[in-house]
Image: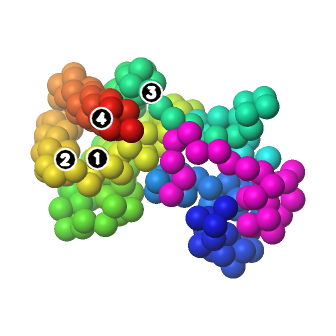
Amino acid sequence: MKILESFAQDVIAKRQPATASIADALRDAILKGVLKGGEPLRQDAIAKQFAVSQVTVREALRILEHEGLVEVAARRGAVVYSLSPDDVAEITDLRATLEGSLIKAAMPSLNAQDFEMAQATIRQLEQTSDIDELIALNVVFHKCLYGKANRPRTTAILDRLRISLEPYLRLLWNKTGYKRQSQDDHKKILELCREKKIAEVEKFLRVHIEKTGREIEDLLKSLATNS
C-alpha cells in the first residue's frame, strides 16, 4: 500500500514495539483521511510495507477494531470502518451523557487555575488553523473542565467514542464558520463553569455536542449523495 509509505518510514525510524507502532501508523492514516471508510486493509501488503509479519499486522488491526476504526469480517478481511448517520447519532448521545456526568463530577474540584488553562486553550484555538492542532486543542479544552472527575473508565470510553468521530471532525474544522461556532460554545461552557452553574453547563454541553453530531450526520448524508 504505497499511500502508507511515509507512515511506514516514520514507524521504522522510531523503532517502537511493532504491534503498537503499526496500530499507531494505521490509526494516524485513518484519522487524517489517508485511508478512507470502506477501504480494504490487506494484511500482506501492510506487512510488506512495514517490514513485519502478517501476525503483527493482524494484532494491530485487532487494536483498531477495538477502537472502532477498523472492521474485521470473516472472508472479507479488514476494512476501514464507515460510520452511518445512525452510528453518529448513537455516539453523539453517548458523548453528551458521558461528558455531562464527567463535568458534573469535576465541577466541585475546578479552580481558577483550571479555568485559566481552559481560557488559554481557547486563545490557542483562535490563533491556529492547523487541523492537527485544532483537534488536539479541542480535546485539551474539554479535558481542562472534566479532568478532575477522577473517572478513568468513563474517560477511556469517551476517548474511544471521540476517536471514532475524528475523521469527520477534521472535515468539520475545515468548514467555513465551524471554528467560530465551536469557539463561541467553548466560551459559553467556560463561563457557566466559572459560575458553578452545574445544571446549566450540563444542558449547554449537550446542545454543543448534539450540534456537532448533527453537522457530522449532514456531512455523511452529503457524501453519500455525491458518491
For residue 94, above or below residue 148: above
For residue 132, above or below residue 189: below
Pointer 4 local density, CA inside 10 Å: few below 14, some 14–19, many at least 20:
few
**Cα distance in 3D space between marks 3 and 1:** 16 Å
Residue bearing the label numbered 2: 178
Residue bearing the label numbered 4: 222
Residue found at x 26% / y 54%: 174
Residue found at x 72% / y 74%: 12
Whether residue 35 is visible = yes
Contact? badges 2 and 3 (CB < 8 Å): no
Q: Is residue 216 left or right of residue 42?
A: left
User: Identity of the amino acid at label 1?
Assistant: Leu
Of the residues under marks 4 and 1, which one precedes in the sequence? 1
User: Identity of the amino acid at label 4?
Assistant: Ser
Q: Which residues are magenta?
A: 34-57
**Cα distance in 3D space between marks 4 and 3:** 12 Å
